Image (cartoon, rainbow, N blue to C red):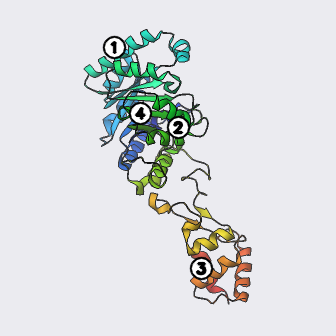
């Protein structure tokens, strides 16, 4: 399954967020080095930043820009120099009426015409069905069959689907999964799970963003999708350098002046930190006791912390690592010393302290 990273476009659809050209260039290069297949740079008709980014980057990944089913949008994307035009239009009955104000027949005529216009310019065309997961599957199949594009993406635009609904909807489609992409929002907190459910059915592409950055609750999370597909039970085959996953995600966040909560899955400062006496004692023997995978696999690092929460089992193991016999008296003295520290100690610091205990 291929990955389209849309951090640079979805991320700045949040209120008050706008990335500079330099930020987009730096982040795009990081994502390219990771190995994502597509990097979505922006909405070319909105301003000239997409064009300026294209002029400064030479990526192995294909660059993409979004365009409404409007000739001017397509022309702006082509002029910007993107490799792929992500043409989008509402497809559900509700959005046809309240967003586009057109009939389904008018939608079909418009999208076919504009897609042909893009293809005439020699660019790759992907068609994204807004609100596709609330559109009748037969109507989607008919639309996809009529539009000349390399890929057709179904979007859960309002973030209302769960994995069972994703599977049901995709199973009802006759379009071959290897011509389908998926785009999920995280309003119910299951965008990553939805993406993995779609991957299980063989879709060709998934849209993701670093830390899930995107409008409202965000999108399927790049690092979560990659990690889950690598160490979980999902059969997705991806083409990224997993050892660079977390360093790349953090580098992108740094370039974009973004941050995450300490408990954010995979990226938060607290995620691979362990202080509980029970946990640290066991993990000194076997880290897998309380870890689903070695963080180093994705470029992360575990932190075992020692202080007032440290128990006798961990204290014994620290003394053993320091080459000291873990007598009851030494264990008690080490625990007293650990209880007095102002901040939790790292493993190396705790072993050094254990070596000082008489």
Sequence order check: which comes first, mark 4 or mark 1?
1
Mark 4 or 1: in front is 4
Question: Where residue 352 sits: x, y (%)?
Answer: 59, 80
Question: Helix or strand or loop: what does disc 2 sit on?
Answer: loop
Whether the residues at callouts 3 and 4 have beta carbons within 8 Å, the answer is: no
Q: Residues within 10 Å of mark 4 (few under 14, many from 20)?
A: many
Question: Helix or strand or loop: what does disc 1 sit on?
Answer: helix
Gap between marks 3 and 2, in whole Å? 42 Å
Q: Is residue 40 left or right of residue 13?
A: left
Gap between marks 2 and 4, in whole Å? 14 Å
Gap between marks 2 and 1, in whole Å? 30 Å
Sequence order check: which comes first, mark 3 or mark 2?
2
Q: Residues within 10 Å of mark 1 (few under 14, many from 20)?
A: some
Residue 116, image quadrant? top left
Question: Where residue 340 sits: x, y (%)?
Answer: 74, 75
Q: Which residue is mark 1?
A: 113
Sequence order check: which comes first, mark 2 or mark 4?
4
Q: Which residue is mark 4?
A: 181
Q: Residue at 38% of width from left, 22% of height from top?
A: 144
Q: Is residue 41 left or right of residue 266?
A: left
Sequence order check: which comes first, mark 2 or mark 1?
1
Residue 351's tag is: 3
Q: Which of the pair 230/321 is nearer the observer?
A: 230
Q: Which residue is mark 2?
A: 219
Q: Residue at 58% of width from left, 53% of height from top?
A: 268
Gap between marks 3 and 4, in whole Å? 51 Å
């Amino acid at each position: 399954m291929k990955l389209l990273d849309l951090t640079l476009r979805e991320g700045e659809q949040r209120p008050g967020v706008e990335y500079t050209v330099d930020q987009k260039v730096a982040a795009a290069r990081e994502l390219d080095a990771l190995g994502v297949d597509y990097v979505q740079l922006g909405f070319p008709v909105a301003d000239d930043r997409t064009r300026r980014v294209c002029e400064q980057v030479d990526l192995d990944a294909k660059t993409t820009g979004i365009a409404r089913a409007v000739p001017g949008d397509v022309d702006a994307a082509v002029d910007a120099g993107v490799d792929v035009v992500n043409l989008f239009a509402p497809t559900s009955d509700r959005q046809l009426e309240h967003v586009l104000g057109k009939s389904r027949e008018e939608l079909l005529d418009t999208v076919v015409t504009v897609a042909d216009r893009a293809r005439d310019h020699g660019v790759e065309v992907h068609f994204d069905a807004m609100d596709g997961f609330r559109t009748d599957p037969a109507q989607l199949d008919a639309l996809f069959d009529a539009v000349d594009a390399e890929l057709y993406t179904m979007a859960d635009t309002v973030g209302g689907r769960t994995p069972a609904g994703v599977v049901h909807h995709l199973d009802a489609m006759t379009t071959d999964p290897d011509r389908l992409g998926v785009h999920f929002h995280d309003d119910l907190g299951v965008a990553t799970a939805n993406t993995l459910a779609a991957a299980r059915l063989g879709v060709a592409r998934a849209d993701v963003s670093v830390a899930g950055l995107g409008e409202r609750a965000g999108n399927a999370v790049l690092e979560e999708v990659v990690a889950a597909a690598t160490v979980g039970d999902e059969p997705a085959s991806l083409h990224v350098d997993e050892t660079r996953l977390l360093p790349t995600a953090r580098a992108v966040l740094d370039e974009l002046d973004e941050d995450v909560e300490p408990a954010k899955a995979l990226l938060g400062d607290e995620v691979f930190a362990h202080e509980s006496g029970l946990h640290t004692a066991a993990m000194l023997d076997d880290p897998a006791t309380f870890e689903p995978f070695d963080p180093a696999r994705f470029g992360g690092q575990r932190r075992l912390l020692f202080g007032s929460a440290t128990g006798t089992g961990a204290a014994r193991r620290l003394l053993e690592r320091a080459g000291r016999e873990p007598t009851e008296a030494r264990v008690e003295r080490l625990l007293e010393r650990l209880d007095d520290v102002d901040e939790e100690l790292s493993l190396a610091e705790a072993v050094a302290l254990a070596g000082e205990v008489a």
